[in-house]
Image (cartoon, rainbow, N blue to C red):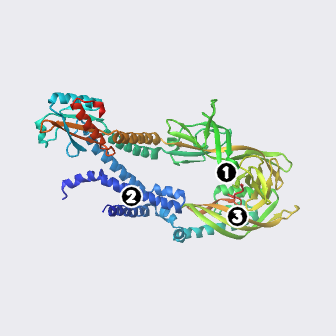
Amino acid sequence: MLLKRSILVVFTGYILFLLFSYVAEYESLILPLFPDKRAASPTVSGERAAIEKVLDTYSKGLTIAYAAKSPNKLDDLPMAEAYKQEIITDILFQVMKKRALQIALRKIEIKRLDFMATTVASVEVHEVWDYSYKYDKGVAGPEKGVSSIDGVYTMQKTVKGWQVVSFTINEGRRRNVAG
Amino acid sequence: MLPAKRFSRIPDFIGSRLLSFILVGVLVSYYILLLVFSVKVHLETVINISQGLPFKILYGALFANLMVCTVRRTPAYIRRCRKAAVIQEDADRTYIVDAGALDGDTAAARMAEFFKKKRFAVVPGGEEPASDESATHGWRVSAVRRRFSPLGSLVSHWGMVITLLGVVVSLNTHFIGEALLPEGAKFWGTAADYTSYDPPTGFRQHAPKVSFRVGKVEAEFWDGKLLFTRLEAYLTSPADGKGEPVPVRINEPLFSNLYTTSVRLTGYGFAPFYVLRNPEGKELESAHVNLAIFPPGNEDSFRVQMIPHRFYVQLYPDYRQREGKPGTASMNLKNPVFHLKVASNKVVTFNGLLLPYQRADVEGYSLAFEGMKRWVTVRVTRDAGYPVIFAGCCLICFGTAWRFAFPRKDVAVRLADDGRSLLVTGRADSTLLSSRWMDDMAKGLENAVKGGNVDAA
């Protein structure tokens, strides 16, 4: 009898737990336990598509802004202000060097997408960019090459949608070199 | 309409043992669930789950159960401390002791002496059970030892209440902040000094008033591997004070303000001193930069003011080349070599190893690392609930020990109907206690009333 009651108590506990969790914190508590379900959920797949679209817009916009040596071309791009300033500084550096950086995205592969919160995402990518420098008249050049990089975009969702907050290269991060 | 009696049963049920068993059962099952989750998901998610609605409801129910139970039982516990207990059917055992042909006064006097030696307090007459008819036939002596021991239950219950109140205080006052501080840095305890803090709002209300200056940072590793045998930072408080620096070790935090505030070390790293020069070799800027490049293999990056590039740095503190690949022989800063990668947004312009003072060419500019400081991350915690929880736990331990290790014992003696024998009954509060104590009491009493050696018992 006691055993039956104990089992009943524990079972009721589980039911209540799932019920309360489902009602209050389904997105943040239950969904992370089932990664497959999470990936397949319409919310997550919708956000992934939105992020892919933003990265595409950002890459094309970057190509245009660098080629035109015009920070104004960045105005409508989905980027956080601090990160935009970094790019502007870089474009102005190219101007100072009397050259234009011509970059074109050859390939982008999203290796991992993590939602740190509902409005913050970390996107691990592998990118291959073709680049060349087009110097102003009278200045020697040009160099060109292929930049194959692994990096991480930090994305944030605002009222206007997703935007790039930062990009860092992370090739050597957390590699064990001791011993 | 429901009868009023049914309503009066609700508080009974809320404060009942049955409900507490149910709630503890559910709590145990929740913790088992957490354990299962912890295998599958990140610790952060497990912590979120543990702070979820089911747990809040459960803790609330436990608190209500404990509160009602304690309040309702307090008068009963106080009543149980009366001088002489009614010893009836629940007596551990009843002994018949031959008293010989003694008059009541002599027997009573000898028993009183015996009880005194056994450190029992004699209650003349004692309380007689109403149903005990034989009580009217002769005299009766009651004795009690550790009369107030039942209060132990009360103390431990109120200890639990205080502990739970401490948890509530803790939840409302808890502040935890992290700061990254290199050697020589001053920490004033302002919001700007912290790299992160929680709760994110109400900083003035929650943050402790602490200030200190970081002196030397020292680290030692076991066999050169990533196992700290010592991590120590010397702090001087206040930040602009001239007092003796106090060591804070990784396993030994510093406490202040009645143990409500603590400062502990949580991380360690390096802050290289970079120098950026223009194409003519003139220094443009220099500074220490705090980087998360420890343990070796970690990469961190920084930007400078004069050029737009980002500098990605790795450190080999004790550089050795193994099979043509860079590595480190130990964690100690013996032969530092940097791996530097410089990128202009998407284009990497420099990628290679760099010795201290060696200059890396970055599109005509140069960057060199010309010094190194150590830094520590410091966790400042304030929690006004800690002393309350500690006091509550002490009360729980004290009350439980008082109630069970030093239980109340009651003994009652009266003359049997035959006028020659004594009926000795007794009870003790603790079930942990062996009933042998009553055997000893009965033997001792027999010896005592016959005028024998009391200590022999």
Residue plotted at (65% across, 45% down): B229
Callout 1 amino acid: Leu
Q: Position of residue B345 (x, y in %)?
A: 73, 60
Q: Residues within 10 Å of mark 3 (few under 14, many from 20)?
A: some
Residue plotted at (23% across, 54% down): B7
Secondary structure at badge 1 equals loop
The quarter of the displayed image where residue B253 is located: top right
The quarter of the displayed image where residue A109 is located: bottom right
> Which residue is at the front of the view, A45 or A104?
A45
Q: Residues within 10 Å of mark 2 (few under 14, many from 20)?
A: many
> Which residue is at the front of the view, B23 or A17?
B23
**Spatial separation of the CA atoms under disc 3 and disc 2:** 47 Å
**Spatial separation of the CA atoms under disc 1 and disc 2:** 41 Å
The residue carrying mark 1 is B226
Name the image quarter holding the C terminus of chain B: top left
Q: Which of pointers 1 and 2 lies earlier in the amino acid sequence?
A: 2
The residue carrying mark 2 is B26
Q: Are marks 1 and 2 on the same chain?
A: yes
Q: Chain of mark 2?
A: B
Callout 3 amino acid: Asp
In this view, B99 is above or below B230 = above
Residue B240 shown left or right of residue A35 in the figure? right
- Is any part of residue B171 visible from this angle? yes
The quarter of the displayed image where residue A172 is located: bottom right
> Which residue is at the front of the view, B406 or A126?
B406
Q: Which mark is residue A150?
A: 3
Q: How many marks?
A: 3
Secondary structure at badge 2 equals helix
